[in-house]
Amino acid sequence: MRQTQFLHMFLVVSLAWLAFLANAEDAYRYFTWTVTYGTISPLGVPQQGILINGQFPGPPIEGVTNDNIVIDVINKLDEPFLLTWNGIQLRKNSWQDGVLGTQCPIPPGTNWTYQFQLKDQIGTFMYFPSIGLQRADGGFGALNIAQRSVIPIPYPTPFGEFTLLVGDWYKSDHKALQQSLDAGKPLPNPDGILINGRPNGFIFTGQGGQTYKFRVSNVGIATSINFRIQGHNITLIEVEGCHTLQEEYESLDVHVGQSVTVLVTLKWSPKDYFVVCSSRFTKPIFNATALLRYEGSNTPASLPLPIGPTYQIHWSMKQARTFRTNSTANAARPNPQGSYHYGTIQVARTLILANTATQINGKLRYAVNGIAYNDPDTPLKLADYFNIPGVFTLNSIQDTPPSGPAALGTSVVGTTLHDFVEIIFQNTEKTMQSWHLDGYSFYAVGYGSGQWTSDKRKTYNLVDAVYRDTVQVYPLSWSAILVSLDNKGMWNLRSAIWSKRYLGQQLYIRVWNSEKSLYTEYDAPPNVLLCGKAKSS
Ligand SMILES: *[C@@H]1O[C@H](CO)[C@@H](O)[C@H](O)[C@H]1NC(C)=O
Ligand SMILES: *[C@@H]1O[C@H](CO)[C@@H](O)[C@H](O)[C@H]1NC(C)=O
Ligand SMILES: *[C@@H]1O[C@H](CO)[C@@H](O)[C@H](O)[C@H]1NC(C)=O
Ligand SMILES: *[C@@H]1O[C@H](CO)[C@@H](O)[C@H](O)[C@H]1NC(C)=O
């Protein structure tokens, strides 16, 4: 190609980029994040943590719907690094998803800039490292999206807001945990639970008589938590970007990878009250506490801690079914959330995905429909884009659980843009499971015990189920979701139980149509990293 021609093409491509990626009226927020190891002692024992700009947990992103986020990530660890934006839909833009199936990792000692838009979203989300078990060392933080000023929210404007990053914590660092998993030992019980990096003592101060928003995310790697505040009921207002019917609860279960937003009114006399996050489905029960302090309080919080549910799986399942969409409320756009009648749409395909614990070549693995996922050296998205053969084959995983022994593989479900799909998560293990889909919200229509059968569809909520990005599956139970695959790209469907994802419980959904158009999917970003077989192409 002659140089002028090339220059011309380059200009056209760059202009197209500008036009599609950036919407002039939407604000830009720039961040430079340096990722390092540092010593932290959340449970009183010094250990290696992953810090962002010296902070543990990492700095929050406080955005507004449609903001453009530009984050230069400088990797000063001794190993490759990626951040993923849990719950951010990244429309047409799986390039920025920060998982090994969509991009090459940022090598140690280098930097890479993410650029994405918080398009049409509102609510409480989070980010965390996606590679190996790095997330067990930190590197996670809040990603909160407020509504644009022209959008009314379906509740009175709170007086203030607080963010709670809650999660299980291990005294071993991620490399030790990975080694132990590689050696075939399942992840042990955690050593504790943290709220904003501390097992106790974090203080939220508010004015008596006022109502506050609490954004609660489970940033842990294995453990469901129960959230409650002494003497105060909590009102659920939002689940992962979906405005809910505003029900009052004494406590809420938040499973790994999930976020909820609640309102709390400080309606008593000035005092300190315990905020409790306790582990669910573990023996013993671990508790983390923080304090809700009324301004002017001279009275310390008094024991005992408010009681939460104990093992009680059925309690949790029943509570999950009470989460419902407020159909008349708007989300990030002014049209009512209930105007999309998902319950009347014909299902094009049903996937039944059964997770199992298994042994492959004498090693512990966790499989989905008989395949424990293994990351190839070449990101799937790059293989697609550059037509590199031999990286993956479509439908290398079956739509229903096969019989026979499990194997390692690179599972990619091939789907067509705009397919409407039903996914049943069948948990054949005796432990909690939690499934997350990148790039999407889905309708969490049903939960049940035992084996799913087609007659369970009669129990689905086809009217006002919440749409969210992470659904829990109870031990030896199933959960069902419906999803409209309207976001082209290569999207990670993963267990949010991080040891299980590490040892194989993940796959990718390739949402595709043959039309190459920036209206349906962006091109590779100008700074795309090349690795594996894409390096030489
Ligand atoms: C990030 O890397 C680019 C080269 O890829 C370099 O020009 C830039 O200075 C780096 N930025 C920082 C903050 O290190
Ligand atoms: C649902 O949203 C509407 C519209 O914003 C609001 O007026 C109503 O109070 C909400 N209902 C419930 C039960 O949350
Ligand atoms: C808290 O909410 C529960 C319903 O979940 C209700 O039964 C109880 O009366 C409420 N308590 C207070 C103090 O409002
Ligand atoms: C956590 O608190 C509960 C009471 O809510 C108590 O039964 C349990 O023993 C506590 N766990 C630990 C490890 O102290």
Image (cartoon, rainbow, N blue to C red):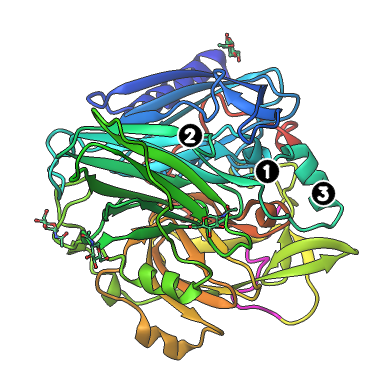
Mark 3 falls on what kind of element? Answer: helix
Residue pictured at 36% horizontal, 69% vertical: 319
Query: In terms of sequence position, does the residue under pointer 1 or pointer 2 come before the other?
Result: 2
Identify the residue position indicated by label 3 in the image.
180
> Mark 1 belongs to which amino acid?
Tyr
| 394 part of magenta stretch | yes
Is residue 90 at all visible to an observer of this figure?
no
> Mark 2 belongs to which amino acid?
Gly
Quick one: 342 or 33, which is closer to the camera? 33
Q: Where is residue 275 in the image (x, y as percent from the top left)?
A: 39, 45
**Farthest bottom residue?**
455
> Above or below — where is 83 with respect to 287?
above
Measure how far apart labels 1 and 2 are at the Cα level: 18 Å
Identify the residue position indicated by label 1 in the image.
170
Q: Where is residue 18 in the image (x, y as percent from the top left)?
A: 36, 24
Indicate the quadrant where residue 354 lies. bottom right
Indicate the quadrant where residue 42 lies. top right
Which residue range is magenta in the image?
392-402
Indicate the quadrant where residue 430 lies. bottom right
Q: Ligand 1, what quadrant?
A: top right
Q: Is residue 308 left or right of residue 261?
A: right
The majority secondary structure of the magenta stretch comes to loop
Quick one: 86 or 344, which is closer to the camera? 86
Identify the residue position indicated by label 2 in the image.
141
Circle nearer the viewer, 1 or 2 = 1
